[in-house]
Image (tube, helix red, strand yellow):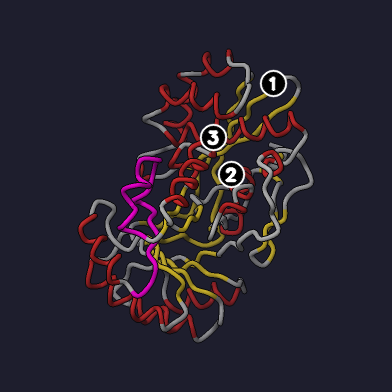
Amino acid sequence: MQLELYPFELKFRHTFTISRKSKDVQPLLVAKLSQDGLSGLGETADNAYYNMTVPRLMEAINTHRDVIEAYTLDTPEAFWETLFPLFKDNMFALCALDLAAHDLYAKRLGKKLYEVWGLDISRNPLTDYTIGIDTVENMVSKLQEFPWPIYKIKLGTPDDIAIIQELRKHTTAIFRVDANCAWGVEETLRNAAAFKALGVEFIEQPMPAADWEGMKQVYEQSALPLIADESCIVETDVAQCHGHFHGINIKLTKCGGITPARRMIAEAKRLGMQVMTGSMNESTVGTSAVAHLLPYLDYVDMDGPLLLAGDTADGVKIADGRIIYADRPGTGAVLRPL
């Protein structure tokens, strides 16, 4: 196979703020794998919380370029298993390669990726749209600027209940709340009780990822379902989340791609947990890959292209929360002219 890497820096439409940081630009890395006249695209994201930068990601992939380019793709799963020992300390880099391999594999079969898996897309969940932390006036303005059926509201301020109360005055849409590890036990229980009456569907990662004892307590007492994010990174985390969260949010970038994500979905379902996939603010390359997992999911947060002012590719489209697949084989993503 031939490997090509394309780094990008895309501006956000608005400054993107969560409980621990703000940013105006999202660095991204797109990987392209080519074989027998066909090519596949994959993507991964820069993320300071996990100490992942685009230069570090490129270095990790280039270190093993010889192995990658000497490989002849059979199945994406076999490719992932070959690369995992080399990338076990960098799932972000492995994700880009795994997504590209799935895209390439489906193109070889002349099918969309969900067709390769025999999935029915007629009941796909809608994606939410994220409202980052800001002044309550600006959060209302963003909500009104972008009418949507489901909003994910980033919280982690001293005024979280007041924010949801004010936003609720301006829409009847479903709310989901993401605290990004900002709360403690009492605050989580208090907020959950208040939010249930305000049309909040669930709370994502209310407490620090390592506080398993606290999460056990809120899991048993919370008025709302709790979804793991920072507490669920790779496959081995799924079982630990059971009995501490009602569901998991799988990020392809964090877990190493589609190959482990499908196993995580199966394990969570076996344990009776709800399953969501989330965004690391990927562009349309990564988002197009996530779209093919939709029939497996209860919830999805794949609004990266909606939050960014630019894009890397054409692929899936999103209209009023609904995902529209590109009429192309593979994931449907095609790089825009560089």
Count every numbered label the image shows and give the total: 3
> From the viewer's perspective, is residue 217 above or below residue 59?
below
Q: Position of residue 321 (x, y in %)?
A: 64, 65
Main structural element of the magenta stretch: helix, strand or loop? loop
Q: CA distance from mark 2 to mark 1?
A: 20 Å
> From the viewer's perspective, is residue 319 above or below residue 224?
above
Q: Position of residue 205 (x, y in %)?
A: 35, 60
Q: Position of residue 232 (x, y in %)?
A: 37, 48
Magenta highlight range? 223-245
Residue to which mark 1 is pinned: 35
**Which callout, 3 or 2, points at the residue further toward the start of the chain?**
3
Q: Which mark is residue 286?
A: 2
Residue at the (36%, 56%) spot, across then down: 21
Image quarter for residue 4? top right
> From the viewer's perspective, is residue 79 above or below residue 183?
above
Q: CA distance from mark 3 to mark 1?
A: 16 Å
